[in-house]
Every structure is written in C-alpha cells, then in structure tokens.
Amino acid sequence: MNQVKKNKEFIIGYFNAISGVIKSRELCEQYITDEQLTQHILFFDGAFPKYEMFIDEITGEENRIVVRGRFKGRHEGELNGIPPTHKEVFFPFVIGYEIEKNKIISHWLIADQMKLMEQLGVMKQTAQ
C-alpha cells in the first residue's frame, strides 16, 4: 500500500476515534504531536462536548492530507465568552494535515465561523 493511502486510512481512523467521545489529551496524543491542534480540539470539546466530525472528501499527496468535512455539536460550554446556548450546530470545514510516522505534526483549518455564530444566535443570518 502506498504512503498516501496509508495516511488517508490513518486520518479516517483518527476521525472515527475522536468523533462523538470526550476528547482527552491522552486520546489526542495517540494521533497528534501538533500542540496547537491538541489545544484546539480540547477547547472545542469544552464548548461542544463529544462533538462529531464527518468526512465528505479526502485527498492527499506525499505526507499531506486534506479533508473537507462537517462539524456537529451541541453548545454546552462557554465559547469565547458566549455562554452555553444548548443549540445544536452544524458547519463545514476544510483541514489539512501533515503526517510523519503515524502522527499529525502540523495542520491548518478553515471553518465557517459565520454559520456557527448564526446558529448560536450571536449574529443575524445572512441572506441566501
């Protein structure tokens, strides 16, 4: 099996392992050495406990994998000063990973934060 295919399978396994469960540092460290990503995951799990992520598309080249997916969670903890709304939210994201020796060593992320703020009721919904 080539390395790109192995890396895609690693990311699919990672998504399956962290979706729908409480995310701990120990769980993250099984897959990640990128401290910023670990902090991001723990922060969002504090605001959206047991949030889920779904892969819609996965592509790769060499040691880089890009995922287009969706986030689903219920707002049960403070999020940047926004008290819990207990609303369920869904929003799209794209995330890129760099993988070495079956660990995520770096990442970048683009998420639709406007859609999140609209669903939490913090911003008015934009015309579609």
Image: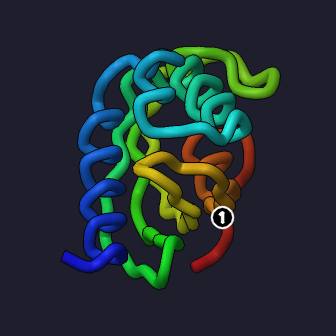
Residue 97 locus on image (x, y percent): 55, 62
How many numbered circles are shown? 1
Q: Secondary structure at mark 1?
A: strand
Residue 30 locus on image (x, y percent): 41, 30
Q: Quadrant of residue 51?
A: top left
Q: Quadrant of residue 60?
A: bottom left
Left or right side of 86 for 58: left
Left or right side of 64 for 110: right
Q: Pick the quarter of the image with the C terminus.
A: bottom right
Residue 17 locus on image (x, y percent): 28, 35
Q: Residue at x 31, y 55 (%)?
A: 10
Q: Residue furthest left?
A: 1
Q: Pick the quarter of the image with the N terminus.
A: bottom left
Query: Are there few (<14), some (14-19), or many (20+) residues within 10 Å of tag 1?
Result: few
Left or right side of 50 for 24: right
Left or right side of 46 for 21: left
Residue 125 seen in this snapshot: no
In this orientation, which residue lies closer to the viewer: 63 or 96? 63
Q: Residue at x 66, y 35 (%)?
A: 40
Residue 22 locus on image (x, y percent): 38, 17
Q: Say which residue label 1 marks.
A: 110
In this orientation, which residue lies closer to the viewer: 122 or 52? 52
Q: Residue at x 58, y 24 (%)?
A: 42
Q: Is residue 87 above or below residue 83?
A: below
Q: Quadrant of residue 81?
A: top right
- Which kind of residue does numbered mark 1 sit on? Ile
In this orientation, which residue lies closer to the viewer: 16 or 49? 16
Q: Residue furthest right?
A: 81
